[in-house]
Amino acid sequence: MLQGGLIHPASPGCYHLLPPAVRSMEKLIRLIDGAMRNIGGQKVNMPSLSSAELWRASGRWEQMGPELFRLADRHSKEYCLGPTHEEAVTELVAAHSNLSYRHLPLRLYQVTRKFRDEPKPRFGLLRSREFYMKDMYTFDTSEEAARHTYELVCRAYRSLFKHLGLRCVQVRAATGTIGGTASHEFQLPADIGEDRLVLCPAGHFAANVEMVDEEQTACPTCGEKLTQSRGIEVGHTFYLGTKYSSVHNAVFYTPENKLQLAEMGCYGLGVTRILAASIEVLSTEDSIRWPSLIAPFQACFIPPKKGSKEEEGAVLLEQLYDDVAEALPCLVGDVVLDDRTQMTIGKRLKDANKLGYPYVVIAGRRACEDPPVFEVWDQSTGTVLYLTKEGVIELLSKVQLP
Amino acid sequence: MLQGGLIHPASPGCYHLLPPAVRSMEKLIRLIDGAMRNIGGQKVNMPSLSSAELWRASGRWEQMGPELFRLADRHSKEYCLGPTHEEAVTELVAAHSNLSYRHLPLRLYQVTRKFRDEPKPRFGLLRSREFYMKDMYTFDTSEEAARHTYELVCRAYRSLFKHLGLRCVQVRAATGTIGGTASHEFQLPADIGEDRLVLCPAGHFAANVEMVDEEQTACPTCGEKLTQSRGIEVGHTFYLGTKYSSVHNAVFYTPENKLQLAEMGCYGLGVTRILAASIEVLSTEDSIRWPSLIAPFQACFIPPKKGSKEEEGAVLLEQLYDDVAEALPCLVGDVVLDDRTQMTIGKRLKDANKLGYPYVVIAGRRACEDPPVFEVWDQSTGTVLYLTKEGVIELLSKVQLP
C-alpha cells in the first residue's frame, strides 16, 4: 500500500491524487451525478483540446491572455487546453440542426479535468493548474425558462452542500471573462479564502466585495450593518443569455417553426477544490476531517501493538473487523484494518488522523471483558463510545455512502 | 434529450462523447475498477501536464517525436501532454523514500484521458488524439515477483474480455517506445483492425506479425500451419524490468536493509477504444450491438403511434414501463420509454437500432389480449419473444449491470 498522504506534487500547480483522494473524489462525483440527474442533467464528455478558431470566434482567444495553455499540433494548427467549455458545447448543440423547442431544456454537463495557467498556483488543490470541474451548460427556449433553470441549478447546489454538511453562502458575483448578465458564487466561509464577502447577518444580502459600492455598509433590505468574511469559491453560476448562442448560432425551431437563439446558462463546481476546501474548513489542528459522506474510508480498526499488554485484544478486533465485513458488505473497502502491529496504537492513531476516518475502532483494556467492549472514536464529535460487537455494527450500519 | 448518436467530432481525432457513450464508458470503467481491485490495484490520478525534464531523463522527449503534444507555460517551462505515465509514476514512487519490501508489490493504476498527436487519426474512437486509457504500473521486489504480477494482470485482462463476451487473443508483441523485455497485445480479431496477427489454429501460438520471421509458417509447438488474421489492439502489457526504476531511482529496502531497484511492469487498456472496437465486432449491418453489460441502456419501450389502430396498446405499455421500474428499481435509468408517439414504431425501432438496446419492447396486436402479451425483441439473438407483464419482468430481472 502506498503510504503517505492525499496528494503529491508533480510540477507547479499539478498534483498526483493518491488512492484515498481518488476514493474521496469519486464519492463526490457520485453525489454530483445524482444532483445533476435530479434536475434533468445529461452527462457528456468534451475534449480537452479546443481549437483556436472556436475561441477566436467568441473573442476569448485574446481575452483570456496567459491563463490559457496554448499549443500547436504537428500540422501547426492551434489549440488551447479547455479551462471551460462554453464555445465547445454551444458548437455541439448548434450542430444539431433539427433542434426543436420540444427538445429543450437541454442540460448538459461533464466532470472532467480543466486547465488554467495560474500566475501563482498555491494552496495545493485550492488553486492548481490542472483540476477537476463539473461544468453544466443549459439551453432554454426563453429568458423565463432559462431563469427557472438557473434557479433550479442554484437550488441543487445549495442542497448538495447542505447534504455534505458544509456551510455555503450564495453571493452575487461579477461575470468576468465568462460573461453574461447575472452570476453567483458559492462560497465556503474560511479565513484562508481568497475572496472577500459582504453579508447581511440576517441573510437578506450576500455579495462578493467586488459587487458592492464602498459606501454601502448596510443591508439594502433590512438596514442591518453588513459584515465581512473571507470565502473559498467552490461553485459559480452564470446567466449567459445569448452571448454564446449568437456567436455559434445555437438555434431551435419554435412552435411556429421559426428559428430562435437558445438562452443559455453555465454552472461550475470545483470538484478537486471542494475536496481541499472541505478539509480546510472542517479539520482541526491535530486531525483531518472530511464531510463524512465523502471521507475516503469510513472506519479504521487499530489492533494493539505486538508484545504490548493489550495484545490479546488483537484477535478480538480482527474478529470484529471480519464480523463487520460480513454484516455490512457494502462497507467492505470503506473499513480499513491497520495491521502494522509493530507500531504503537498511538502512532497509528496519528496516521489515521492525517487521513481523516470518521470512526476509529480500538481494542483497549475493556476488549477482554465478556462480552468484549471496544473503543470507538467518533472523530466528527471528538467523543469516545464503548460498544460491544453488536453496538459497533449498529453504529456503522448508519454510515451513509454515496 | 440530445438526439443523435454516440460521438460528435470536435476537431480531427477529438470527439465529444454524447450521453449514451458516457453511460457505456462509465459502465466499462466500473468493470475495469473491479478487475483492478481484484488484483490489488490502487487507483491514482496523475496530471496530464508532464514536465519535459522527466521525459528528457528517460530519453523519450526526443524518441517520441511528433506524437507528443508539447507546450510551454507562461514561464516558458516545457511540458508534454501525457500519452502514458511511466516516468511520472516512477518518480512518484521514487519520492516515497522509505519504501520497504513490505510495501511491495505496488499496483497503481488510473483511468484518465491520454493524448497522442496521431499522424492520421481515423475510425472515430479507434484511433483518436484524445482517448481514455486505463494504465497500471506495478513495482515488485524481484524479477520472479514481477513475472507473477505480469501473469496476474494478463489473466485479469482475459477474464474481463470473457466477461464482456468479446473474443480476445493475447499475442506476443514488440515493446516499441515503451521498452522493456517482453510484451503482449490483447487483440480483438476484426477485418477493420490495423494489426496483422499470426495464430496457431489450436491456440499454441499467437503473435503480432512484426514478431514473426517471414519463413515461420508453422506453429513452433504443434507444427500446424499458422493462420493470419487482422486485429484491433485493445490492451498492451509490458514487462519493464528496471528500465524506468533505474532512471528515476525507484528503490526499496530489502529485508537486509539494502536499497534495491524495483522491478516494473506497465499495463494499458484502451477504454474508449474498447467501446468502439466492441461495437465494430458485434454489430450487424442494420443495428449496433454492444456487449450487453456495457450497453448504454438495457431496454427501450416503444408505444404505438398516436392515431394508429394499435393505439390502445400505449396505455398498457406505459403501465408495463412503470411496473418494470417498480419491480426492478436498479434498472431505472437503464430502461427508456420512447414516447415520440408522433412517429411510427418502425422509425423509432430504427433509431433504437442505431443506439443498440439489448431489448426492445413493443405493444403489438397481442397487447389487447387478456392478459396483455408484449413483443420483446432480443437484439443479441435477433429473436422475438411474446411475454406477459410477469414474463417481461422475469426476463429483465436477469439483466446484469456492472
Image: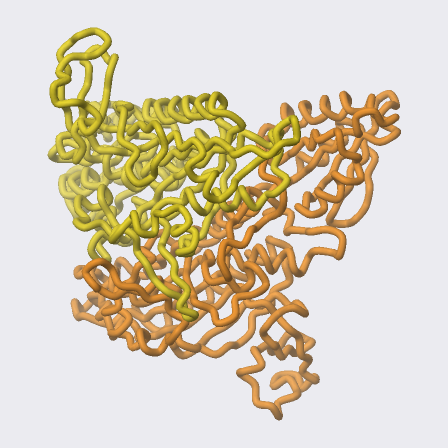
Chain colours: A yellow, B orange
Quadrant location, the C terminus of chain B = top right
The answer to whether B123 is drawn above or below residue A9 in the figure is below
Residue A285 at x, y = what percent?
11, 34
Left or right side of B384 for B231: left
Residue situated in front as seen by the camera: A307 or B129:
B129
The answer to which of A299 and A325 lies nearer the viewer is: A299
- Percent x, y of residue A238: 36, 31
Quarter holding the N terminus of chain B?
A: top right
x and y percentages locating residue B241 in the rendered image: 34, 74
- Image-based side of B239 in relation to B103, left or right: right
Q: Nearer the viewer, residue A143 or A300?
A: A143
- Residue at the extreme top: A222
Confirm whether residue A376 shows in the render. yes
Examine the rendering and report whether any part of residue A315 can be seen. Answer: no
Q: Is residue A31 left or right of residue A64?
A: right
**Residue at 42% from the left image edge and 55% from the top image edge:** A53
Q: Is residue B350 above or below residue B41?
A: above
The relative height of residue B296 versus residue A240 in the rendered view (above or below) is: below
Residue A273 occupies quadrant: top left
Q: Residue B169 lies in what quarter of the image?
A: bottom right
Q: Residue at x 47, y 69 (%)?
A: B118
